[in-house]
Amino acid sequence: MTDQTSTPIAAPKAARNTTAAIALVALLAAIFITPVALNDQFIYHIFITICIFAGLSTAWNIVGGFAGQLSLGHAIFYGIGAYAGIMLTNLGISPWIGMFAGAGIAAVVAVIISYPCFRLHGPFFALATIAFLEVFHQLALHFRDFTGGATGMMIPLNIGWEWMVFRERLPALIIAFGMMCFILAVAWWIRSHRLGFQLVATRERESAARAAGIGTVKVRLIAVAISAALTAMMGTFHGMYLTFIEPESAFSLAFSIQIAMFALIGGLGTVFGPLLGAVLLVPITEFARGALGAEAVGLHGFVYGAVLVLVVIFIPNGLMGVVGRWFKPADTEGKQAEAVAAPDEVRAFTPPEPGEEIVRVRNLNKHFGGLHVTNDVSFTLREGEILGLIGPNGAGKTTLFNMISGFLDADSGTVEIKGKDGKWHKPTNPADFATLGVGRTFQIVQPFAAMTVEENIMVGAFHRYPHVEDARAAARRTAEKMGLAPYLNSEASSLTIGGLKRLEVARVMAMEPRVLLLDEVMAGINQADVRRAIDLMLSIRDEGVSIIAIEHVMQAVMSLSDHVIVLSSGEVIAEGKPKAVVEDPQVIEAYLGKEFTHA
């Protein structure tokens, strides 16, 4: 490891945060004060609508932005909230109670319909949410005794705060503004706490998130339940504000797309992007409707589409991408990440005596159709040992890694991990392996590109430290050890391949593993980085971490490994000390061909 000097980043970051907070408070104040100052009923309506759509879009963004699940059926939860509020109001129950009843129902429905949908990816998930939306639309039409059918439902005109019905617009603005601020606060809390980090990690790289011990389905279900509840609450208020609800508008695909559109234009996955999208678009469409009247039917769709096209072409990160540049100075830290001097030679080391067995692999077999990828593979790993796993391309090394980290089920055979309790366990999924102290990297590096270096490492640290500040402190300690301390505020995407590989190792080390699985961490990097990586791995082993490393860089295998296993065509053809293994005729034949065995 080389000495690193940290850069003074805390003060500028705090100043930027303060400036951003002041700008946000000013925007929120303008949203509330402007209609009050102008005291015009139409202006009141515009700003109430801004608050409603900003709240709905922010709630959608928890699933569509943070978790990366493009839900186009979110009007389901809006409709549930609106109908729950109006139905209970007709029974003489205040919509303030109906609001929470609708939120609870929406959260349950969201979990029930989302669990099977989360098995789908890409456009199939979006299509499934549209299908469920149509199901609810048809149910609302069919059960007319409860919903009023196609004719809809009116609310009893009981005036007062208890019923959310007012002669003046100001009380409605107060409620809409308060609900919008509440939803923004929930979204900010989620994004700045463990759940938010885990959702973004799941969105960016689901495999890497699972390797970090994140229950990806669980965190998505939590997100969709919260999102649905918030959407239903705003739906209850909006139904009372409109005084009427009917299936065509409550369970509308166009309405669902409209909610998502504000987040896409404002900045998908950002906390305040949906607010900016609503502030930009709602006044344009509402003023156009007011000016053109019946001639403006459908105009809002044209406006949204035109603005979306312009945003995609010119500001693909949305309005928050533009605003963010105002509060963020030019960052060259990531570009400097590979400028750190590497040691001229690998430090000498004396291999420690191997300890007790910590991993047992017995008779692993895996077939893909008629291809036998691994054939009766067995080996053990001891505490404090570095085990090199080598073999030609297609030998089955990565498949073996996937089986001993829970990403792939073996057709037969067992993988046992010795826990801290001294007992042997047979984990079955990545989360179980992570709990037992097994961490892994990937052959193709998998950073969370939308996060900073510090946030990437924090995702791993959350496995041991649930609180943000504890995880941040652990991430910084790990970054210092990995030579990444100067680049904590750099975006992960700004690092070169050598920096990204160190970042991935750092994320795993922040989990405080007992066993580290390294899948070609030295592939594609220059010789200086190879020497640095070897030194880094030795320092990791010195901390008591056992390592299994797949490598094609023979310099690394010879320098690092206490024991080497050679795979060829899915079978173990040799194992032992590094020098003895590379001189084995079977190994030479596997790598170079039979004619070289007598050379």
Image (cartoon, rainbow, N blue to C red):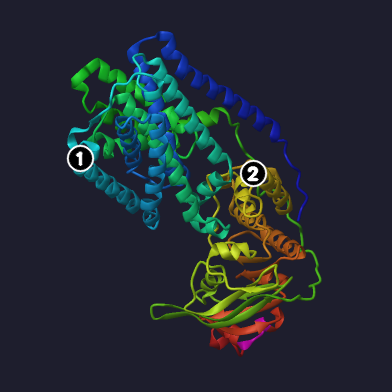
**Residue farthest bottom in this picture:** 598
**Front one among 420 and 143:** 143
Quarter holding the C terminus?
bottom right
Residue 478 picture location, percent across and down: 70, 52
On the question of residue 521 being in view, the answer is: no
Q: Is residue 33 above or below residue 472?
A: above
Circle 2 sits on which residue?
Answer: 468
Give residue 165's position: percent from left, percent from top: 35, 21
Q: Magenta region, mostly helix, strand or loop?
A: helix
The mark that comes first in sequence, 2 or 1, is: 1
Q: How many marks?
A: 2
Q: Say what amino acid the circle numbered 2 marks.
A: Val
The residue stretch that appears in magenta? 581-585
Identify which amino acid the numbered label 1 is placed on. Answer: Arg
Task: Answer whether residue 87 is magenta in the image.
Answer: no
SS at badge 1: helix
Dot 2 alpha-carbon crowd within 10 angstroms: few under 14, some 14 to 19, many 20 or more: some
Q: Position of residue 402 (x, y in %)?
A: 53, 69
Image quarter of residue 533: bottom right
Q: Which residue is mark 1?
A: 144
- Residue sitting at 41 percent across and 18 percent down? 171
Answer with left or right where residue 284 lies relative to residue 588. left
